[in-house]
Structure formats: C-alpha cells, structure tokens
Image (cartoon, grey):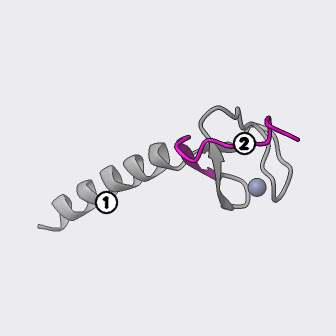
Amino acid sequence: METSKKVSPREKEIEYICNSCLYPFKRKESINVTVCPYCGKRNSVEPKSLRSAQALLDEAIERDSNL
Ligand SMILES: [Zn+2]
C-alpha cells in the first residue's frame, strides 16, 4: 500500500506564465518553478498574478490618458 501517494486537494495552485513563449500553466504552491515546461527556458517563468497586475495597471493608465 502506498500511503504517500495521498495528495492533499487543498494545496493551493499558482498560475505561472512563461515570458519567453507565453505558455500558461499551474503548479502547486510548494513547487519552486524556474523552468518553463513548454520551451524549457530557465528564469523566464513568473507567477501570472504579478504579470496581470502589471497589465491591469498599464491598461488603467492607458484608459486614463484617453479621457
Ligand atoms: Zn516557455
């Protein structure tokens, strides 16, 4: 019997995106992601939340200047 196979369904997953190929993926919070699973590039992966926050900011600024 493999009791170690039990996975906690409650573990939080983080959305990442690769800045190189823009491939989005999810990994558990406990996993340290440095390599893109799609293109294999190192240090081009970052949490999507960071990226979208910045994108929203840019959008807001753009909208402001259009008024
Ligand atoms: Zn990639």
Real-space CA distance between mark 2 and mark 1, rounded to the nearest whole angstrom: 43 Å
* Residue identified by numbered label 1: 59
Front residue of 18/37: it is 37
Specify the quadrant of the image occupied by residue 38: bottom right
Q: How would you rate the neighbour count of disc 1 (Cα within 10 Å): few for under 14, some for 14-19, many for 20 or more?
A: few
Which numbered disc flags the more N-terminal residue, 2 or 1?
A: 2
Q: Secondary structure at mark 1?
A: helix
The residue sitting at 83% across, 47% down in the picture is 41
Principal secondary structure, stretch drawn in magenta:
loop
Q: Position of residue 19 (x, y in %)?
A: 66, 52
Q: Residues within 10 Å of mark 2 (few under 14, many from 20)?
A: few
User: Residue sitting at 81 percent across and 53 percent down?
Assistant: 37
Q: Residue at the location (65% across, 57% down)?
A: 25
Residue farthest bottom in this picture: 66
**Camera-nearest label, 2 or 1:** 2
Is residue 39 placed above or below 8 in the rendered structure?
below
Q: Which residue is mark 2?
A: 6
| Horizontal arrangement in the rendering, residue 9 relative to residue 4 (left or right) | left
* Callout 2: SS: loop
- Report the residue that reaches farthest toward the front: 1
Q: Amino acid at mark 2?
A: Lys
| Marks 2 and 1 in Cβ contact (< 8 Å) | no
Q: Work out whether residue 10 or residue 48 is closer to the camera in this orientation and state it.
A: 10
Residue span colored magenta: 1-17
The answer to whether mark 1 is within 8 Å of ligand 1 is no
Q: Residue type at mark 1: give it.
A: Glu
Image spot of residue 32 (x, y percent): 70, 32
User: Is label 2's Cβ within 8 Å of ligand 1?
Assistant: no
Residue 52 position, x and y percent, is: 43, 53
